[in-house]
Image (cartoon, rainbow, N blue to C red):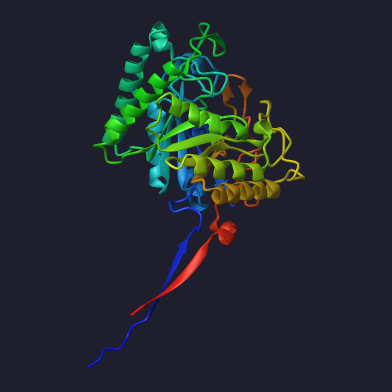
Amino acid sequence: MQKNSICVIIILIFPPLFAQEFYFGCDLSYVNQMEDCGAIFKEKGQPKDVYQIFADHGTNLVRARLWIDPSWWQSPLEQPEGVKLFYNDLEDVKKTLQRARAAGMKTMLGFHYSDFWADPGRQLIPKRWQVAAYDTNALKDSIYVYTRSVLIELDSLGLMPDFVKVGNENNSGVMNHIAKEGDYNPITTISETWERHAVLFNAAIKAVRDVGATASVNPEIVVHFAGELTTHEWFIQNLLDHGVTDFDIYGFSYYYAWHKGSIPLLEETIHELVTKFPDYEIMVVETGYLWSTENYDSLINIVTVPDPNYLPVSPEKQLEYMVDYTKAVMRGGGMGVIFWEPAWVTTPCRTPWGQGSSHDHLAFFDPINTNFLENGAGNWPNPSHYKDLIKTKEIEVK
């Protein structure tokens, strides 16, 4: 007797231009400190775990920065009672990774290989390694041992990150500047040679590979540069020419306020990088965009220039900008976008430059009540914005 056929309609949803999961990331490195400083994050007026707020609105990746020893510049800052002496050290990073994982998000650990923010103009060698500043072999050993020990410890706690970023905006190299005692402004450049920088990059990369080979998670390795969109082909080729080849993702920073390229140029740039360097994924690992031109505290705002195609500045335009930006990355073939510090809200805490937040006008929370802005870019990861990049297919199974 012939059995009746059973027809099942399966809906397959897949992005037509990229095979892997697309990452909607947020750097939440400031969150733990903001809460210690008195911030109470809310949604619809009710207090709620801030990591869960991000996860519930579609964020699926959390980035955390790691400094080696920030105590020498953080401890002297006069902070409110109850605030720890310093943050973004390994103990603080453990808390960030654990909370992100608990909310169901993947994680990216960013090694700055510095005690302070590393960026294109400032790659300060850690104080503890300054004695070996001109000894590349000693630094190579130090960066390897340090990276390996951090990852082994994280893995032992079930906190091995999904992505490891070896450095931060390394345009000028790795651990390449020295500051005077007690200062964070570079006064000496150690080396201009990429032969030296390549040795240090490869030591860090080898440490990640060695630990990942037997760890619970084998992280993908990210390198990170910043600059105008026309510079990134040079940065990748420069790495390859100097023997830095064993990474998975080329990540870059792109803010309109500093890099001035348009969203169409962003798409074109990513497409060209994906085409020319097919062995590597491309990700925007840092960006940000304003929803207000006002400053809500005494600390100067650092992102102040809006894209003229997205005026007037408002939460709605912030959302529109980030959606269009992300669509451009998707169409270009990129694998993700990370928004920098959307929970850096205004509090009584101090930075080296003053009290408050430089991102109160970018954060996804209003500066008065720390309530999630439903009409702002906090909703940028919502899949409903990307229906034009999603295809559905029906399959009949008998």
Mark yes or no: residue 359 visible: yes
User: Residue 201, located in which quarter of the rendered image?
Assistant: top left
Q: Position of residue 82 (x, y in %)?
A: 48, 26
Instruction: Please name the residue shown 51% across and 32% down the image.
Output: 30
Residue at horizontal 24 percent and vertical 37 percent from the top: 214
- Using residue 181 as the reference point, say whether residue 2 is left or right of it: left
Total number of numbered discs in the rendering: 0
Position of 162 with respect to 255 (left or right) is: left
Residue pushed farthest bottom?
1
Q: Is 299 placed above or below 316 here?
A: above
Give 213 or 315, whichever is nearer the viewer: 213
Residue 173 location, x and y as percent?
Answer: 49, 20
In the rendered structure, the answer to whether residue 287 lies left or right of residue 6 reads: right
What residue is rendered at 53% in x and 61% in y? 390
Q: Quadrant of residue 368?
A: top right
- Location of residue 39 by image quarter: top right
x and y percent of residue 155 in the render?
Answer: 29, 35
In which quadrant is the C terminus drawn? bottom left
In the depicted view, which residue is nearer to us: 219 or 340? 219
Quarter that holds the N terminus: bottom left
Judge whether 211 appears above or below 103 on screen: above
Regarding residue 26, the answer to whether it shows in the image is no
Q: Measured from the top left, where is residue 256 in percent x and y?
A: 66, 36
